[in-house]
Image (cartoon, helix red, strand yellow):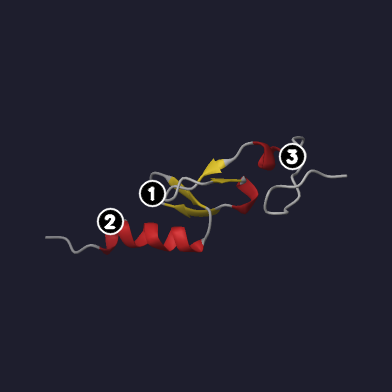
Amino acid sequence: MQSKAHTGATIGSCSDDDVCVPLICDLCKAEIPQSAAQTFEGADYTAHFCGLGCMETWKRNHPAKDSQPSV
């Protein structure tokens, strides 16, 4: 019998590296498995999000540098 998370999802074996090391959502700080993370790759960083809602909120609060008018 496989282990289940409180949400009912199957917990993977730690022989699978992407399920053993959780990431942290850059907006709400929730722990998420690497296999389920949404990512946004900027020029100098990669941000991880638990879902599209957090990613869209983060993008609204962090406009791309090249989209801002230069003075």
Tag shown at residue 65: 2
At label 3, the amino acid type is: Asp
For label 2, the SS is helix
**Mark 1: few/some/many CA within 10 Å (<14, 14-19, 20+):** few
Is mark 2 in CB contact (under 8 Å) with mark 1? yes
- The residues bearing labels 2 and 3 have C-alpha atoms spaced at a distance of 37 Å
- Mark 3 residue element: loop
Task: Say left or right for 5 vs 37.
Answer: right
Q: How far is mark 2 from mark 1, CA to CA?
A: 10 Å
Q: Is residue 32 left or right of residue 55?
A: right
Q: Position of residue 42 (x, y in %)?
A: 40, 51
Mark 1 and mark 3: Cα distance apart in space: 29 Å
* Residue 16's disc number: 3
Q: Secondary structure at mark 1?
A: loop
Is 33 drawn above or below residue 17 in the view shown? Answer: below
Mark found first going from the N terminus, 1 or 3: 3
Left or right for 46, reference 36:
left
Q: Nearer the viewer, residue 28 or 38?
A: 28
Amino acid type at image mark 1: Ala
**Could you tell me the amino acid type at mark 2?**
Lys
Tell me the residue at 70%/47% (across/down). Answer: 5
Please report whichever mark, 2 or 3, sits nearer to the chain's N-terminal start.
3
Residue under the image location 19 percent in, 64 percent down: 69
Q: Residues within 10 Å of mark 3 (few under 14, many from 20)?
A: few
User: Where on the picture, by quarter, is residue 8?
Assistant: bottom right
Query: What residue does disc 1 label?
Result: 43
